[in-house]
Image: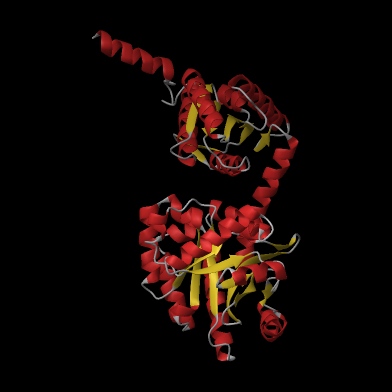
Amino acid sequence: MDTISSESGALIAHYDPLTTLPNRLLFNELLNKAINHCKRRQAILAVLMLEIDTFDTLYSTIGKEMSDAMLKEVAKRITKIVRTEDLVARLEGDTFIILLNDIGKPKFASSVAEKLLYTCALPMKINTREFHLTASIGISIYPHDSQSLEEILDNVDKVLYKAKTAGGNRYQFHTEEMDKEAREYIQLGADLRKAIHNKEFVLYYQPKLHIKQGKINGLEALLRWAHPKLGLLNPAKFIPLAEDIGLIMEMGEFALREACQMNKYWQGEGYEHLTVSLNLSPKQFYHPDMPSLIEKILKETELNPNYLELEINESTVMADIEKAMACLKNIKEMGVQLSIDHFGVGYTSISHLKQFPISAIKIDSSFIKGAPNNPNDSAITNAFIVLAHSLGFEVVAEGVETAEQLQYLTAQQCDMVQGYFLSYPLPAAKIALQFKKLMESVLI
């Protein structure tokens, strides 16, 4: 009996009786643990404090029973938005607090805040009456603007007040710089959704030179966004965002189809042995529909699978070895070529590397940049080339910018090179004009 009573007492002490969410006491305890976790792992967390706008006025109008029903519904909606590893608590009244663990970048919190504002604003029916609510949110980021539990709670309370006094129905970061960055991130996400419909994406191509054959035998297709206001944007600016907001498969489908169609056209023009390669993002690579999408596009474009190469970052395949192996095998069975991109920065073990059904590795440009003058970079590059050849893989060096680097890689028996020394990435209309010029100008 005493054990049951003590357990019941603990539950009452740590949970809000109305919403069954953790209360302030439990939230503070778990936030402290999360801060210590972040310190050890140099990770980032966000705390969002949310209040319903003009709730006090509503309470005096509709009474306690309906107000409680409203708060329970808000609690449900908030809980559905966050991830399983996050935490939602009710502090008191209409004040809720959310802990976002391991967010990667502070601006991720703005995406969650946007979703929270949206879900709170959806019509809410209590008994027979319909209500339209808005909310305000304050956001504090550890360790960027707060270093302790007390500082986080103090800062998030202050910026919540700012959001409410600015008119409500908005979120506010503790620092103006972070607030500006987050709003730009959200705006870019809105623009990205329009970009697909408006056909603002284009592929640029960068040649690969096969050193021994002395000819261009492949091109990497690189996605660019022709933003109507910001100009031509590189993938680093929008690919992570596309993954965050669920657009990566749609964008990837465009890039894959466009690259296959273009290669088929070039082959019809007499460039019969060109391979076109594309990099798959982590979410593309692990998506269950990816193999069927590849198969569908190859069939539509009538491109021989052998002339399509898919590059997967080393860190992507190392994230889940067993799952990665299955994905690689599914794609390889179609006849598509596979290579490991950014090799050397993802800690691939040799035992796993020899099992991957790949045909090539691409040495990360960070190693090529220092060669041949930096002894460490040269030694690592040499070792990668020997290792790859011993396992039957070809080697591509990316980021080649000088004749000296090309001569060094030739001496080390590197198979292919790619980089600004040969050509900057160019649109399809220009790259074909460069084929002959490149062949005449490359000196090995």
In the rendered view, would you say 104 is above or below 13? below
> In the rendered picture of this protein, how many numbered marks are placed on residues?
0
Tell me if residue 142 comes above or below residue 179 in the rendering.
above
Left or right relative to 209: residue 296:
left
User: Does any portion of residue 254 appear in the rendered image?
Assistant: no
Is 10 rendered above or below residue 207? above
Residue at the far top: name it.
2
Q: Residue 441 or 212: which is nearer the viewer?
A: 212
Residue at horizontal 44 percent and vertical 26 percent from the top: 21
Residue at 67%, 79% in the rendered image: 431
List x then y, in percent, for residue 320.
Answer: 41, 51
Residue furthest out toward the left: 1
Please name the residue shown 58% across and 34% down the image.
46
The reply, left or right, for residue 17 in relation to residue 158 is: left
Image quarter (top left, top right, bottom left or bottom right) of the C terminus: bottom right
- Front in this rendered view, residue 1 or 390: 390
Q: Residue 175, image x and y in percent? A: 72, 33
Q: Nearer the viewer, residue 387 or 442?
A: 387
Say if residue 154 shows up in the picture: yes
Tell me: 128 left or right of 269: left
Which residue is located at x 64 percent, y 68 percent?
408
Colour scheme of this structure image? Answer: secondary structure
Residue 216: percent from left, percent from top? 61, 80
Q: Nearer the viewer, residue 81 or 402?
A: 402
Quadrant where the image shows the N terminus: top left
